[in-house]
Every structure is written in C-alpha cells, then in structure tokens.
Amino acid sequence: MDACPPHRPHNIFFDKKGKVTADMSTHSKIPSGLGARRDRTVQEYEHDTYKLKGKLKEPTVCTECGALFHNGRWTWNQKPADADEITCPACLRIRDKYAKGFLTLSGSFLTEHKEEIMGVVHNTEAKEKTEHPLSRIMGYEQQAAALMISTTDTHLPRRIGEALHHAYQGELKVHYDEGEEFIRVAWKR
Ligand SMILES: [Zn+2]
C-alpha cells in the first residue's frame, strides 16, 4: 500500500552536468527486508515511537549506542552520572529495520570502482555520525546491479549522494516524501 501524497512532493534531479531539473518519475520500489513498511498505520506508529524530542528528560543516554541527549541535541559526549536511560530513535529504527531513507547506487562505473565508491560512502557516514549521532547506515542490500543502502535519518542519503556526485559526477536524484518524513536518493554512473 503506497501512501501517495495528495500534492506532488518536490523532487530534485541532477543531470550529468550537475544541473538541477524536476524529477517526474513515480515512486521507486523499496525492497522488502530494508524496512518497506510504509502504510498509514506504521506512519502513525512512527510518530509515537521515534519522535522522542521534547519528551526526553535531560540528560538522557542511549543504553545501546551511548549517544547522549543534552541541551536539546544528541551528541557523543561523556554521559553524566545522573543520566536517564533509553534506546535512542536510531537504535530503535535499526532494531525494527524501519528506515527513514534509502540510497540506491547503480551503473557500470559503480561495478568497476566499488571499493573506492564504498570508501566515500563509509567516510561520509563516519563524518555525519560524528556530528549527528542519529545519522547512520542501517543496512546494505544488493539487488541485481544496484546496491540499496538504508539509513536512520533523511540527511545521510543526500549527503552520501552529493559526495558521490561531487567526486565522480554521474546522475543524482533526490526525492522527498510528503512532509520530508522520508527520502529516496539514487546515484547512477
Ligand atoms: Zn542508540
């Protein structure tokens, strides 16, 4: 069941020269196993479960990954002795296999330069995660010639896509679902 928004979501398309044009393509299919549950019930569940900001006491630490919520944001700072304990939204999403973003990599250049490209993917994630503890890669799934990467937030797929586009050009597509609650990014070369 695809929860299609009543209005056209804004899509961004970068052509081979890096020019931005509109993307009028329909929704790409999300593979099962990477958190394909996108029906309305799950969306409501998501609002309750993953949006902890504003409800959290400060400081609060995630018992899974050690991320600390303090002064209104998540950091990797040392936890104070009196910190509350929870499981952070990123760890909950990883546990539930419920992604907030997808990045699809494809093309013959990818196949030929996989190691290099994966280096850019991992470095970009490491850099983002240092500053934004809830920004993480959840999983990888090889689908024929394409590699699907699922993430815990909506920023990471775009950051990685832009890093790849910057380093190797190619085609970059960015698609946000209604309300920017979910992102699909595709890079192809
Ligand atoms: Zn955590």
Image: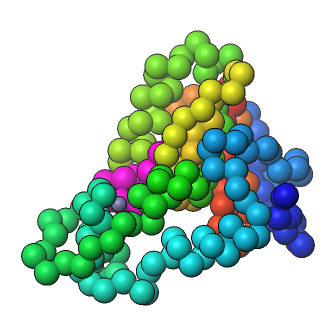
**Screen quadrant of the C terminus:** top right
Queried whether the magenta region covers residue 129, the answer comes back as yes
State which quadrant residue 41 falls in: bottom right
User: In front: 173, or 17?
Assistant: 173
Query: Which quarter holds ligand 1?
Result: bottom left
User: Residue, x 10% and y 76% (percent of image)?
Assistant: 81
User: Residue, x 47% and y 52% (percent of image)?
Assistant: 94
Horizontal side of 68 relative to 166 (left or right) equals left
**Screen quadrant of the N terminus:** bottom right
Q: Residue 74, percent across and down?
A: 33, 69
Q: Is residue 153 above or below residue 6?
A: above
Q: Is residue 112 above or below residue 184?
A: above
Instruction: Give the residues in magenta.
Output: 128-137
User: Residue, x 83% and y 50% (percent of image)?
Assistant: 27
Q: Residue 173, percent across and down?
A: 72, 45
Horizontal side of 120 relative to 106 (left or right) equals left
Q: Residue 58, percent across and down?
A: 27, 84
Horizontal side of 139 relative to 108 (left or right) equals left
State which quadrant residue 162 falls in: top right
